[in-house]
Image: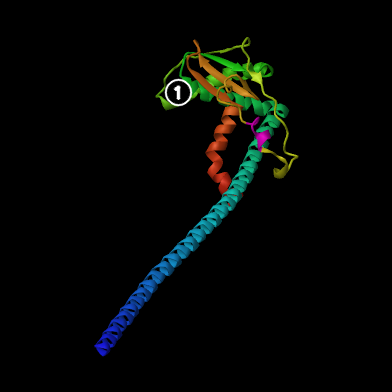
Amino acid sequence: MFQEQISLADFVLQEAREKCFEIEVKAFKQFEKEKKQIVEREKSNVQEEINTRFKKKAQQERIKHSALVNGARMKLMNARNQALMKIYSDSQYQIYRMIRQDERFYEELLKNLIVQGLIKLFEHEVVVRCLHRDIRHVKNVTDDAIAEFQDILRKELNGLEFEVKIEVDEDKCLDERTLIDNSIKGVQEYSLQESASEVISKTENDKKCFGGILLTNKDGLIVCKNTLDVRTEQTFQDSLPIIRSTVFGK
């Protein structure tokens, strides 16, 4: 009986040991599984953080590079605009100097501007406004301008006879705009702030100029701006592609 009890105790003890070993193996496997999951999860988190930092760094570098490129491009654009406005300033002043030094040249120019204005307006009665100092010059060429205008109409419109009368408005003279001689300055010394005064605004270009004329019909409702300011700006804008190609290359 005692022997049976010992055998039973050994059996139970052996069962307990096996069960304990089984639980231990199962627990170890579960531990390894969970450890592997944790390691993989942390590796993934670390890799994700590395990727995020790399992307952020790459984005910062792209932004920095873009800012440098845009800054360089803006400097180039400003330098080109500065050079172009210097050319515009010098051109204006060269014309201004020519009309002040050579009356014959200026009166011929005024006559041509009047003829162009008469063609555009095509009115029987035309009022011409100019600078006070130019009244004499305008009056000197009105008859020649009318004759040339009528001659053009005869040739182009099968002998059409068109009477036209020009009145020089001495009471409403245009205001004179003073030009600055920037020809002695280099491009680097000429600032874009200075160039703002070189271009007259569209709200002022029928009130002030450095030369030329403004023509209207009798009641002033139709206006032809043929001031030197308007014409030089128009010519400059039309010539910009050629100027850019010549100065900066293609």
Q: Secondary structure at mark 1?
A: helix
Is residue 164 in the magenta section? Answer: no
- On the picture, is 185 further left or further right than 65? right
* Magenta highlight range: 192-198
How far across and how far down the image is residue 86, in percent? 66, 39
User: From this viewpoint, which residue is outermost toward the bottom?
Assistant: 3
Q: Name the residue tied to disc 1.
A: 153
| Residue at 68% in and 30% down | 96
How far across and how far down the image is residue 40, in percent? 41, 68
- On the picture, is 65 further left or further right than 45? right
Q: Is residue 250 visible?
A: no
User: From this viewpoint, which residue is outermost toward the right?
Assistant: 184
Q: Is residue 204 visible?
A: yes
| Residue at 43% in and 27% down | 156
**Image quarter for residue 30?**
bottom left
- On the picture, is 153 further left or further right than 240? left
Q: Nearer the viewer, residue 110 or 180?
A: 180
Q: Nearer the viewer, residue 148 or 186?
A: 186
Amino acid at the residue labelled 1:
Leu
| 70 over 177 or under it: above or below | below
Numbered-mark total: 1
